[in-house]
Amino acid sequence: MFESLLGTINGWVWGPPMLLLLLGTGLYLSIGLKGLTLRQISRSFKELWAGRLGAGEGEIPPFRALMTSLSATIGTGNIAGVATAIGIGGPGALFWMWMTALVGMATKYAEAVLAVEYRQKNDKGETVGGPMYYIRNGLGPKWAWMGVAFAVLCGLGGFGIGNGVQANSVADALNLSFGVPEIATGVALAVLIALVIFGGVKRIAVVATRLVPIMAVAYILCGLIILGIHAVEIPAALATIVKSAFSPVAATGGFAGSAVWLAIRMGVARGVFSNEAGLGSAPIAHAAAQTDNPVRQGRIAMLGTFIDTIILCSITGLVIVVTGVWTGTEQGSAMTAAGFSSVLPGGDKIVALGLAVFAFTTLLGWSYYSEKCFGFLFGVKALVPFRVLWVLAIPFGATINLGMVWTIADTMNGLMALPNLIALLMLSPIVFRLTRSEIEKSGE
Protein backbone atom coordinates (compact mmCIF):
# COMPACT_ATOMS: atom_id res chain seq x y z
CA MET A 1 0.00 0.00 0.00
CA PHE A 2 2.75 2.45 1.03
CA GLU A 3 4.90 1.55 -2.00
CA SER A 4 1.90 2.00 -4.28
CA LEU A 5 1.26 5.46 -2.81
CA LEU A 6 4.92 6.37 -3.25
CA GLY A 7 4.79 5.26 -6.85
CA THR A 8 1.74 7.43 -7.50
CA ILE A 9 3.38 10.48 -5.93
CA ASN A 10 6.60 9.81 -7.84
CA GLY A 11 4.69 9.60 -11.12
CA TRP A 12 3.11 12.98 -10.42
CA VAL A 13 6.37 14.63 -9.34
CA TRP A 14 8.19 13.41 -12.45
CA GLY A 15 5.31 14.04 -14.81
CA PRO A 16 5.40 16.29 -17.90
CA PRO A 17 5.33 19.60 -15.93
CA MET A 18 8.53 18.74 -14.02
CA LEU A 19 10.38 17.50 -17.10
CA LEU A 20 9.33 20.62 -18.99
CA LEU A 21 10.46 22.83 -16.11
CA LEU A 22 13.86 21.11 -15.85
CA LEU A 23 14.65 21.09 -19.54
CA GLY A 24 12.95 24.44 -20.15
CA THR A 25 14.93 26.20 -17.42
CA GLY A 26 18.20 24.82 -18.75
CA LEU A 27 17.31 25.75 -22.32
CA TYR A 28 16.21 29.26 -21.31
CA LEU A 29 19.46 29.83 -19.38
CA SER A 30 21.52 28.41 -22.27
CA ILE A 31 19.91 30.85 -24.69
CA GLY A 32 20.19 33.75 -22.24
CA LEU A 33 23.90 33.00 -21.80
CA LYS A 34 24.27 32.77 -25.60
CA GLY A 35 25.69 29.27 -25.46
CA LEU A 36 28.50 30.26 -23.08
CA THR A 37 28.46 26.93 -21.26
CA LEU A 38 29.17 25.02 -24.47
CA ARG A 39 31.56 27.59 -25.96
CA GLN A 40 33.79 27.86 -22.91
CA ILE A 41 34.34 24.26 -21.84
CA SER A 42 38.09 24.41 -22.61
CA ARG A 43 38.43 27.67 -20.68
CA SER A 44 36.58 26.12 -17.77
CA PHE A 45 39.11 23.29 -17.56
CA LYS A 46 41.94 25.86 -17.54
CA GLU A 47 40.26 27.80 -14.72
CA LEU A 48 39.70 24.55 -12.84
CA TRP A 49 43.43 23.80 -12.96
CA ALA A 50 44.25 27.34 -11.90
CA GLY A 51 41.71 27.00 -9.10
CA ARG A 52 43.84 24.59 -7.11
CA LEU A 53 44.80 27.63 -5.05
CA GLY A 54 41.99 29.80 -3.78
CA ALA A 55 41.90 33.60 -3.97
CA GLY A 56 39.27 35.38 -1.91
CA GLU A 57 36.82 34.63 0.86
CA GLY A 58 35.66 31.07 1.36
CA GLU A 59 36.56 27.79 3.00
CA ILE A 60 38.17 25.70 0.24
CA PRO A 61 39.92 26.35 -3.12
CA PRO A 62 37.67 26.33 -6.23
CA PHE A 63 39.19 23.04 -7.41
CA ARG A 64 38.28 21.35 -4.14
CA ALA A 65 34.80 22.87 -4.29
CA LEU A 66 34.26 21.09 -7.61
CA MET A 67 35.73 17.85 -6.26
CA THR A 68 33.37 18.08 -3.27
CA SER A 69 30.49 18.62 -5.68
CA LEU A 70 31.63 15.74 -7.87
CA SER A 71 32.00 13.52 -4.82
CA ALA A 72 28.23 13.84 -4.43
CA THR A 73 27.32 13.53 -8.11
CA ILE A 74 29.66 10.71 -9.13
CA GLY A 75 27.96 7.80 -7.43
CA THR A 76 25.42 5.07 -7.97
CA GLY A 77 23.75 7.21 -10.64
CA ASN A 78 26.73 6.60 -12.94
CA ILE A 79 26.57 2.82 -12.53
CA ALA A 80 23.16 1.70 -11.26
CA GLY A 81 21.22 4.79 -12.38
CA VAL A 82 22.26 4.59 -16.04
CA ALA A 83 21.52 0.86 -16.10
CA THR A 84 18.11 1.41 -14.48
CA ALA A 85 17.26 4.10 -17.04
CA ILE A 86 18.19 1.85 -19.98
CA GLY A 87 16.65 -1.26 -18.40
CA ILE A 88 13.26 0.47 -18.10
CA GLY A 89 13.31 3.15 -20.80
CA GLY A 90 15.49 1.43 -23.39
CA PRO A 91 18.72 2.72 -25.01
CA GLY A 92 16.99 5.98 -25.92
CA ALA A 93 17.05 6.96 -22.24
CA LEU A 94 20.81 7.61 -22.62
CA PHE A 95 20.08 10.17 -25.35
CA TRP A 96 17.75 12.06 -23.01
CA MET A 97 20.38 11.91 -20.27
CA TRP A 98 22.71 13.68 -22.71
CA MET A 99 20.12 16.33 -23.52
CA THR A 100 19.50 16.90 -19.82
CA ALA A 101 23.23 17.35 -19.27
CA LEU A 102 23.80 19.75 -22.18
CA VAL A 103 21.17 22.20 -20.96
CA GLY A 104 21.93 21.26 -17.35
CA MET A 105 25.40 22.77 -17.68
CA ALA A 106 23.76 26.20 -17.94
CA THR A 107 21.60 25.40 -14.93
CA LYS A 108 24.63 24.36 -12.87
CA TYR A 109 26.50 27.48 -14.00
CA ALA A 110 23.65 29.75 -12.87
CA GLU A 111 23.34 27.94 -9.54
CA ALA A 112 27.03 28.46 -8.72
CA VAL A 113 27.02 32.12 -9.84
CA LEU A 114 24.09 32.88 -7.53
CA ALA A 115 25.54 30.78 -4.70
CA VAL A 116 28.75 32.85 -4.63
CA GLU A 117 26.94 36.16 -5.22
CA TYR A 118 24.52 35.71 -2.29
CA ARG A 119 26.54 33.64 0.19
CA GLN A 120 27.12 34.78 3.77
CA LYS A 121 28.84 33.90 7.04
CA ASN A 122 27.20 31.67 9.65
CA ASP A 123 27.56 32.00 13.42
CA LYS A 124 30.83 30.06 13.32
CA GLY A 125 32.29 32.46 10.76
CA GLU A 126 32.09 29.88 7.95
CA THR A 127 31.12 30.88 4.42
CA VAL A 128 27.79 29.25 3.51
CA GLY A 129 25.41 29.51 0.59
CA GLY A 130 23.13 27.68 -1.78
CA PRO A 131 19.52 27.98 -2.96
CA MET A 132 18.13 28.67 0.52
CA TYR A 133 20.43 31.71 0.74
CA TYR A 134 20.06 33.05 -2.79
CA ILE A 135 16.30 32.70 -2.48
CA ARG A 136 16.19 34.62 0.80
CA ASN A 137 18.93 37.15 0.02
CA GLY A 138 18.21 37.53 -3.69
CA LEU A 139 14.42 37.44 -3.85
CA GLY A 140 13.76 39.12 -0.51
CA PRO A 141 11.81 38.33 2.70
CA LYS A 142 8.48 37.57 1.02
CA TRP A 143 10.09 34.60 -0.73
CA ALA A 144 11.92 33.34 2.38
CA TRP A 145 9.36 30.54 2.77
CA MET A 146 10.57 29.06 -0.50
CA GLY A 147 14.15 28.99 0.83
CA VAL A 148 12.90 27.21 3.93
CA ALA A 149 11.00 24.72 1.74
CA PHE A 150 14.16 23.95 -0.22
CA ALA A 151 16.21 23.48 2.97
CA VAL A 152 13.63 21.08 4.40
CA LEU A 153 13.39 19.04 1.20
CA CYS A 154 17.14 18.95 0.61
CA GLY A 155 17.94 18.27 4.27
CA LEU A 156 15.53 15.35 4.47
CA GLY A 157 15.96 14.28 0.85
CA GLY A 158 19.67 13.81 1.43
CA PHE A 159 18.84 10.81 3.57
CA GLY A 160 17.32 9.21 0.46
CA ILE A 161 19.44 10.26 -2.52
CA GLY A 162 22.70 10.76 -0.64
CA ASN A 163 22.47 8.19 2.12
CA GLY A 164 19.98 5.35 1.69
CA VAL A 165 20.43 4.86 -2.07
CA GLN A 166 24.23 4.92 -1.80
CA ALA A 167 24.47 2.56 1.17
CA ASN A 168 21.88 0.19 -0.30
CA SER A 169 23.47 0.00 -3.73
CA VAL A 170 26.99 -0.65 -2.48
CA ALA A 171 25.79 -3.20 0.09
CA ASP A 172 23.89 -5.05 -2.64
CA ALA A 173 26.88 -4.98 -5.04
CA LEU A 174 29.38 -6.22 -2.44
CA ASN A 175 26.99 -8.94 -1.33
CA LEU A 176 26.52 -10.23 -4.89
CA SER A 177 30.22 -10.02 -5.87
CA PHE A 178 31.99 -10.89 -2.62
CA GLY A 179 29.30 -12.35 -0.35
CA VAL A 180 29.67 -9.55 2.21
CA PRO A 181 26.54 -9.28 4.43
CA GLU A 182 24.62 -6.04 3.86
CA ILE A 183 24.70 -5.06 7.52
CA ALA A 184 28.49 -5.49 7.62
CA THR A 185 28.86 -3.13 4.67
CA GLY A 186 26.51 -0.65 6.33
CA VAL A 187 28.43 -0.63 9.59
CA ALA A 188 31.82 -0.33 7.84
CA LEU A 189 30.57 2.60 5.74
CA ALA A 190 29.16 4.30 8.82
CA VAL A 191 32.50 4.11 10.64
CA LEU A 192 34.50 5.42 7.67
CA ILE A 193 32.05 8.26 7.01
CA ALA A 194 32.10 9.29 10.66
CA LEU A 195 35.90 9.58 10.58
CA VAL A 196 35.61 12.14 7.78
CA ILE A 197 32.46 14.22 8.28
CA PHE A 198 33.21 15.21 11.86
CA GLY A 199 36.15 17.14 10.42
CA GLY A 200 33.84 19.45 8.46
CA VAL A 201 33.99 20.62 4.84
CA LYS A 202 37.77 21.02 4.76
CA ARG A 203 38.35 17.36 5.60
CA ILE A 204 35.59 16.27 3.21
CA ALA A 205 37.21 18.37 0.45
CA VAL A 206 40.65 16.84 1.07
CA VAL A 207 39.31 13.28 0.87
CA ALA A 208 37.21 14.13 -2.21
CA THR A 209 40.17 15.76 -3.97
CA ARG A 210 42.22 12.60 -3.51
CA LEU A 211 39.57 9.99 -4.31
CA VAL A 212 37.39 11.54 -7.04
CA PRO A 213 40.06 11.98 -9.77
CA ILE A 214 41.53 8.53 -9.14
CA MET A 215 38.22 6.67 -9.17
CA ALA A 216 36.88 8.59 -12.18
CA VAL A 217 39.99 7.95 -14.30
CA ALA A 218 40.13 4.26 -13.33
CA TYR A 219 36.47 3.73 -14.24
CA ILE A 220 36.86 5.58 -17.55
CA LEU A 221 39.94 3.52 -18.51
CA CYS A 222 38.15 0.22 -17.83
CA GLY A 223 35.16 1.41 -19.85
CA LEU A 224 37.34 2.55 -22.75
CA ILE A 225 39.05 -0.85 -22.88
CA ILE A 226 35.65 -2.50 -23.33
CA LEU A 227 34.55 0.05 -25.92
CA GLY A 228 37.86 -0.36 -27.76
CA ILE A 229 37.26 -4.10 -28.04
CA HIS A 230 33.72 -3.40 -29.29
CA ALA A 231 34.75 -0.44 -31.46
CA VAL A 232 33.07 -1.90 -34.55
CA GLU A 233 29.70 -2.00 -32.76
CA ILE A 234 29.82 1.60 -31.49
CA PRO A 235 28.28 3.27 -34.60
CA ALA A 236 25.36 0.82 -34.51
CA ALA A 237 24.97 1.37 -30.77
CA LEU A 238 24.82 5.15 -31.25
CA ALA A 239 22.23 4.70 -33.99
CA THR A 240 20.15 2.50 -31.68
CA ILE A 241 20.36 5.09 -28.89
CA VAL A 242 19.21 7.95 -31.13
CA LYS A 243 16.48 5.90 -32.85
CA SER A 244 15.17 4.61 -29.50
CA ALA A 245 14.95 8.16 -28.18
CA PHE A 246 12.19 8.95 -30.70
CA SER A 247 10.64 5.53 -31.47
CA PRO A 248 9.10 2.86 -29.21
CA VAL A 249 11.34 -0.12 -28.49
CA ALA A 250 9.78 -3.57 -28.83
CA ALA A 251 10.22 -6.24 -26.19
CA THR A 252 13.32 -8.34 -26.75
CA GLY A 253 15.01 -10.90 -24.53
CA GLY A 254 14.52 -9.83 -20.94
CA PHE A 255 13.63 -6.24 -21.97
CA ALA A 256 9.90 -5.59 -21.62
CA GLY A 257 9.68 -2.88 -24.27
CA SER A 258 9.43 0.87 -23.88
CA ALA A 259 7.42 3.82 -25.17
CA VAL A 260 9.11 7.11 -26.14
CA TRP A 261 7.61 8.85 -23.12
CA LEU A 262 9.17 6.28 -20.78
CA ALA A 263 12.59 6.78 -22.41
CA ILE A 264 12.29 10.54 -21.88
CA ARG A 265 11.07 10.21 -18.30
CA MET A 266 13.76 7.72 -17.28
CA GLY A 267 16.51 9.60 -19.11
CA VAL A 268 15.68 12.96 -17.55
CA ALA A 269 14.98 11.57 -14.07
CA ARG A 270 18.14 9.46 -13.93
CA GLY A 271 20.17 12.21 -15.62
CA VAL A 272 19.17 14.68 -12.94
CA PHE A 273 19.73 12.04 -10.25
CA SER A 274 23.26 11.58 -11.55
CA ASN A 275 24.45 15.13 -12.32
CA GLU A 276 22.07 17.01 -9.97
CA ALA A 277 21.71 19.97 -12.37
CA GLY A 278 18.66 21.88 -11.21
CA LEU A 279 18.35 20.17 -7.84
CA GLY A 280 20.23 22.97 -6.07
CA SER A 281 22.59 20.68 -4.16
CA ALA A 282 25.89 21.43 -5.93
CA PRO A 283 25.83 25.23 -5.33
CA ILE A 284 25.99 24.51 -1.59
CA ALA A 285 29.54 23.22 -2.16
CA HIS A 286 30.50 25.92 -4.66
CA ALA A 287 29.41 28.63 -2.22
CA ALA A 288 32.32 27.57 0.00
CA ALA A 289 34.91 28.21 -2.74
CA GLN A 290 37.71 30.70 -2.07
CA THR A 291 36.87 33.14 -4.84
CA ASP A 292 35.61 36.67 -5.36
CA ASN A 293 34.39 35.94 -8.88
CA PRO A 294 30.94 34.31 -9.17
CA VAL A 295 31.23 33.86 -12.94
CA ARG A 296 34.55 32.05 -12.73
CA GLN A 297 33.15 29.66 -10.14
CA GLY A 298 30.10 29.16 -12.36
CA ARG A 299 32.33 28.07 -15.25
CA ILE A 300 34.11 25.61 -12.96
CA ALA A 301 30.82 24.33 -11.57
CA MET A 302 29.32 23.50 -14.96
CA LEU A 303 32.15 21.00 -15.52
CA GLY A 304 30.55 18.83 -12.86
CA THR A 305 27.64 18.06 -15.18
CA PHE A 306 29.93 17.57 -18.18
CA ILE A 307 32.25 15.14 -16.37
CA ASP A 308 29.45 13.25 -14.65
CA THR A 309 27.04 12.68 -17.53
CA ILE A 310 28.71 13.43 -20.85
CA ILE A 311 31.79 11.41 -19.88
CA LEU A 312 31.07 8.91 -17.08
CA CYS A 313 27.40 8.08 -17.76
CA SER A 314 28.18 7.80 -21.48
CA ILE A 315 30.89 5.22 -20.73
CA THR A 316 28.45 3.13 -18.68
CA GLY A 317 25.60 3.48 -21.16
CA LEU A 318 27.68 2.61 -24.22
CA VAL A 319 29.17 -0.43 -22.47
CA ILE A 320 25.65 -1.64 -21.66
CA VAL A 321 24.43 -1.14 -25.23
CA VAL A 322 27.44 -2.47 -27.20
CA THR A 323 27.67 -5.61 -25.06
CA GLY A 324 23.93 -6.24 -25.47
CA VAL A 325 23.30 -6.80 -21.76
CA TRP A 326 20.39 -4.34 -21.80
CA THR A 327 18.26 -7.09 -23.39
CA GLY A 328 19.01 -9.46 -20.51
CA THR A 329 17.27 -9.95 -17.18
CA GLU A 330 19.75 -8.04 -14.98
CA GLN A 331 18.77 -4.66 -13.57
CA GLY A 332 20.63 -1.81 -11.87
CA SER A 333 24.29 -2.29 -11.01
CA ALA A 334 24.01 -6.00 -11.94
CA MET A 335 23.42 -4.97 -15.56
CA THR A 336 26.53 -2.78 -15.60
CA ALA A 337 28.51 -5.57 -13.94
CA ALA A 338 27.33 -7.99 -16.63
CA GLY A 339 28.55 -5.59 -19.33
CA PHE A 340 31.99 -5.27 -17.78
CA SER A 341 32.23 -9.02 -17.05
CA SER A 342 31.46 -9.89 -20.67
CA VAL A 343 34.86 -8.47 -21.64
CA LEU A 344 37.03 -8.05 -18.55
CA PRO A 345 37.79 -11.00 -16.25
CA GLY A 346 36.34 -10.13 -12.86
CA GLY A 347 34.44 -7.22 -14.38
CA ASP A 348 31.66 -7.60 -11.82
CA LYS A 349 34.19 -7.10 -9.03
CA ILE A 350 35.59 -4.00 -10.76
CA VAL A 351 32.09 -2.54 -10.87
CA ALA A 352 31.40 -3.52 -7.26
CA LEU A 353 34.59 -1.85 -6.02
CA GLY A 354 33.94 1.21 -8.18
CA LEU A 355 30.43 1.43 -6.82
CA ALA A 356 31.75 1.18 -3.26
CA VAL A 357 34.17 4.08 -3.72
CA PHE A 358 31.62 6.15 -5.67
CA ALA A 359 28.99 5.61 -2.98
CA PHE A 360 31.47 6.45 -0.21
CA THR A 361 32.29 9.84 -1.68
CA THR A 362 28.61 10.53 -2.42
CA LEU A 363 27.79 9.87 1.22
CA LEU A 364 30.43 12.47 2.10
CA GLY A 365 29.25 15.11 -0.35
CA TRP A 366 25.60 14.78 0.52
CA SER A 367 26.32 14.84 4.23
CA TYR A 368 27.67 18.35 3.68
CA TYR A 369 24.66 19.43 1.61
CA SER A 370 22.10 18.18 4.11
CA GLU A 371 24.12 19.52 7.04
CA LYS A 372 24.12 23.03 5.62
CA CYS A 373 20.36 22.82 5.11
CA PHE A 374 19.87 21.81 8.73
CA GLY A 375 22.25 24.63 9.73
CA PHE A 376 20.12 27.09 7.75
CA LEU A 377 16.97 25.87 9.50
CA PHE A 378 18.21 25.40 13.07
CA GLY A 379 21.58 27.15 13.34
CA VAL A 380 25.06 25.78 13.93
CA LYS A 381 23.94 23.99 17.10
CA ALA A 382 22.23 21.40 14.87
CA LEU A 383 25.40 20.38 13.02
CA VAL A 384 26.81 17.78 15.42
CA PRO A 385 23.43 16.08 16.10
CA PHE A 386 22.89 15.96 12.33
CA ARG A 387 26.23 14.23 11.74
CA VAL A 388 25.39 11.61 14.35
CA LEU A 389 22.00 10.97 12.73
CA TRP A 390 23.59 10.77 9.26
CA VAL A 391 26.04 8.09 10.41
CA LEU A 392 23.34 6.06 12.16
CA ALA A 393 21.13 6.11 9.05
CA ILE A 394 23.76 4.37 6.88
CA PRO A 395 23.34 0.77 8.22
CA PHE A 396 19.56 1.18 8.01
CA GLY A 397 19.77 2.30 4.38
CA ALA A 398 22.05 -0.61 3.54
CA THR A 399 19.46 -3.21 4.54
CA ILE A 400 16.07 -1.88 3.33
CA ASN A 401 14.23 -2.54 0.07
CA LEU A 402 16.06 -1.02 -2.92
CA GLY A 403 12.92 -0.30 -4.93
CA MET A 404 11.44 1.82 -2.18
CA VAL A 405 14.73 3.67 -1.67
CA TRP A 406 14.95 4.59 -5.36
CA THR A 407 11.32 5.77 -5.40
CA ILE A 408 11.78 7.96 -2.33
CA ALA A 409 15.02 9.41 -3.76
CA ASP A 410 13.39 10.17 -7.11
CA THR A 411 10.45 11.87 -5.40
CA MET A 412 12.66 13.99 -3.16
CA ASN A 413 14.75 14.98 -6.20
CA GLY A 414 11.74 16.39 -7.95
CA LEU A 415 10.32 18.15 -4.92
CA MET A 416 13.56 19.90 -3.94
CA ALA A 417 14.15 20.99 -7.53
CA LEU A 418 10.90 22.99 -7.67
CA PRO A 419 11.84 25.96 -5.44
CA ASN A 420 15.35 26.02 -6.88
CA LEU A 421 14.21 26.13 -10.52
CA ILE A 422 11.64 28.83 -9.77
CA ALA A 423 14.35 30.89 -8.07
CA LEU A 424 16.76 30.40 -10.99
CA LEU A 425 14.17 31.73 -13.42
CA MET A 426 13.37 34.72 -11.21
CA LEU A 427 17.04 35.54 -10.60
CA SER A 428 18.19 34.85 -14.16
CA PRO A 429 18.57 38.60 -14.94
CA ILE A 430 21.21 38.74 -12.18
CA VAL A 431 23.06 35.79 -13.74
CA PHE A 432 22.97 37.40 -17.19
CA ARG A 433 24.10 40.78 -15.83
CA LEU A 434 27.04 39.32 -13.89
CA THR A 435 28.06 37.27 -16.92
CA ARG A 436 27.95 40.27 -19.28
CA SER A 437 29.95 42.34 -16.80
CA GLU A 438 32.65 39.68 -16.55
CA ILE A 439 32.83 39.27 -20.33
CA GLU A 440 33.17 43.03 -20.82
CA LYS A 441 35.82 43.24 -18.11
CA SER A 442 37.90 40.43 -19.60
CA GLY A 443 37.43 41.74 -23.15
CA GLU A 444 36.12 38.44 -24.52
Image (cartoon, rainbow, N blue to C red):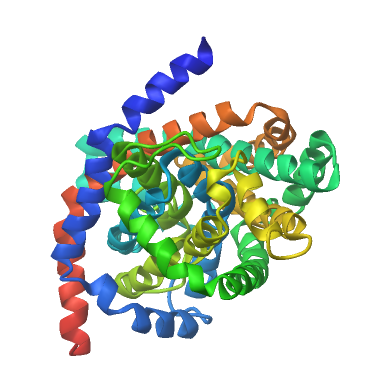
Query: Quadrant where the C terminus lies?
Result: bottom left
Residue 407 x/y as whole percent: 50, 30
Q: Residue 331 versus residue 31: which sits nearer the camera?
A: 331
Q: Give the residue displayed 63% in from the left and 64% down from the top.
A: 208
Give left or right: position of 173 versus 138. right
Q: Quadrant of residue 146?
A: top left
Residue 19 x/y as whole percent: 27, 41
Residue closest to the far top = 1
Q: Is residue 187 above or below residue 343?
A: above
Inspect this view and state whether residue 424 appears.
no
Give left or right: position of 131 versus 326. left
Query: How many numbered marks appear?
Result: 0
Q: Residue 35 versus residue 343: which sits nearer the camera?
A: 343
Q: Is residue 5 above or below residue 256?
A: above
Q: Give the residue displayed 74% in from the left and 48% down from the top.
A: 194
Inspect this view and state whether residue 268 appears.
yes
Q: Quadrant of residue 148?
A: top left
Residue closest to the far bottom = 443
Residue 428 x/y as whole percent: 18, 56
Q: Give the residue displayed 79% in from the left and 48% down from the top.
A: 177
Q: Quadrant of residue 436?
A: bottom left
Give left or right: position of 165 versus 347. left
Q: Give the residue displayed 38% in from the left and 47% down from the top.
A: 267
Q: Is residue 131 above or below residue 221?
A: above
Q: Residue 388 versus residue 93: which sits nearer the camera?
A: 93
Q: Residue 349 versus residue 196: which sits nearer the camera?
A: 349
Residue 99 x/y as whole percent: 31, 57
